Amino acid sequence: MQTTAMAALGGGLLVVATGLTAAPPIDATDTYLDEIVVTASRVRQPLTQSLRHTTVITAADIRASQAADLPTLLRQQAGIEVTQSGGVGTQSSLFLRGANSNQALVLLDGQRIDSATTGAAALDQITLADIERIEIVRGNVSALYGASAIGGVIQIFTRKGTGRPAGELRAGLGSYGTQSLSGDYGGQFGATRFHLSLAHRDTDGFSAARSEFVPAPFVFAPADADRDGYRNTTFTFNLAHDLEAGHTLSALARASRGRVEYDGTFSNRSEQDLDALQLTSENRFGERWTSRLMLATSRDALDSFLDSAPASRVHTRNRQIDWFNTVTLAPDQSLTLGLGWLGQRVASDMTYTRTRREARHAAAGYVGEFGRHGVQLNLRTDDYSDFGSHSTWLAGYGLEVAPGWRLLASAGTAFRAPTFNDLYNPAWGGNPNLRPEKARSWEAGLQYASGPWLARLVHFDTRTRDLIVYQWPAGNVNLKRAEVEGWELSASGRLADIQIGLSLTAQDPRDADSGQPLLRRARRLGSLTLRHENGPWRLAAEVKASGAREDIHATTFSRIRLPGYTVFNVSGRYRLSQSLALEARVDNLFDRDYSLVHGYNTPGRSGHLQLEWRF
């Protein structure tokens, strides 16, 4: 199976290489030269000038994928692995460049949405109906964003209103008793822009636990051989008003209500509410100075149950103030200065010895382009009320060696702040004397950008020390070191009338002390996406392949090796009229039996049919 997967991906690489040398003439608008990103440097810059390995998932990509949720969409990207303990909505873990799931920062329109207790964002509860685009920056950017950006940053941008008001309604049916209904409406009236989105998804699901492990003491109960359903409703409202030229006030309100069933002897159902509120003032003071002031709050409220009896309650809240300034020194040269505050709070029926803390930060940066040369420098200091101050830095350089070809190199430091579970929860081995995890990283790569093609080949190396681990009977301690080094390739473009997306990753995530591989991370993974549009038709095919990974056995708790897998997905869209379209997607086309987490099922062959009406 792995051989077939690598052969398919290798064939895709050959196609891409052919395209790089013999791309046909294209329309001038069909290029990456006009794609603007902000996450890699916090300055608006063309994607091709970013010194960090950055990928953009556009609104067109999201719609064409017809993915059910964010984890499904992200699995197609280079360097990203997402595991889930069952079907849609079940607990997920994101590994970005082999880093732990709490070492990758997820932002929503610039706002942190991670849990203060786990340090990770609930990606499994994020639907796609209200998302306009996603920017993925791989590797250490802690000097820009502070704690938890060791593996990289994923920034989600919600849909904003523009132009004449218009809307969409979408209704779908699918396998496992799935029903979906979503709609949005947005546009502009004079100086005011708005966008409203509402989405609901309900599925009966399948048994999260594999039948051969049910029952198992302290893991699965006899009743766990049942279907585990999921329901989610998400509401998003964006509003922006231009007070005068160069001065805009905007607001975001987002609320997600998720209910997921799963398998376990201590709890088997959870209800999770994710809320985000944001008020932003964007101002241009003169020709050279722009400012962005954001006031935001987010809540992650998780309530678990055993059948109908309450099992646990963990509610966390982040409050943020972020003031970021950009000063244009000269054309293609910018100085950035920022100040910020973060307040975190926990409310739980579990005992936490401390439930509040604060962090303040100051940051400065420089981004410049000088002919064939590009430079990025960043410095940041974060001061936490419970474990002190920590500084990080980043330096990047790019050199155009030939038209369309650019060499890239960067290095920097990073850290991860211990969470409330790490520090203050005795049931989780809480240790208030923990030090933050610290990392040093470097990377070097080659970029090709011309016409419809953008490709990056990058070698990366990240070494983390003071890794926080649980050690019986001491609890959480700073002990281990982790190392992740490897290569990643991302390429996208057009060959004839086929849109191609390719990602390949070869990495070695390991415990530096024991030499053992880090859990649930493969050494080889990749994906290939092909998309074709012809008149009213749009057809797409995806293949996702992963090598073997090590995990913990679901019932014996010993190490076990999960075999590699290859999954094929296909989708299509037919435009019935200017306002009506029919979409269909089939996941796991060949009904492969595989596991992302030992002891848990993944979906078999499944389909979804959706009707879309634009008005």
Image (cartoon, rainbow, N blue to C red):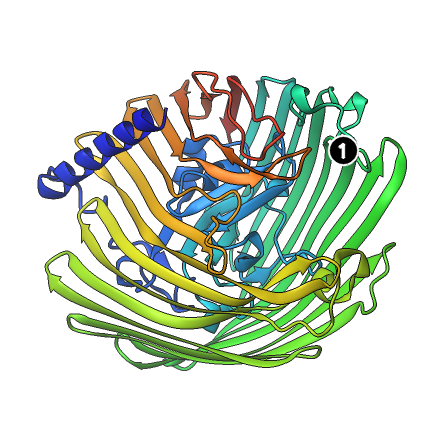
Residue 385 drawn at (x, y percent): 70, 79
Q: Residue at x 34, y 59 (%)?
A: 460
Q: What element carries label 1?
A: loop
**Residue 166 makes an appearance in the image:** no
Look at the picture and state if 429 lies above or below 125.
Answer: below
Between 119 and 99, which is closer to the camera in this rendering?
A: 99
Q: Residue at x 66, y 41 (%)?
A: 234
Residue 570 drawn at (x, y percent): 40, 22
Look at the picture and state if 579 lies above or below 296.
Answer: above
Instruction: Give the left or right position of residue 612, taking residue 479 as reference.
Output: left
Between 317 and 264, which is closer to the camera in this rendering?
A: 264
Instruction: Give the left or right position of residue 207, taking residue 515 as reference.
Output: right
Q: Mark 1 points at which residue?
A: 264
Instruction: Give the left or right position of residue 397, taking residue 372 as reference.
Output: right
Q: Which residue is drawn at 55% across and 40% down?
A: 551
Which amino acid lies under the numbered mark 1 shown in the image of this protein? Gly
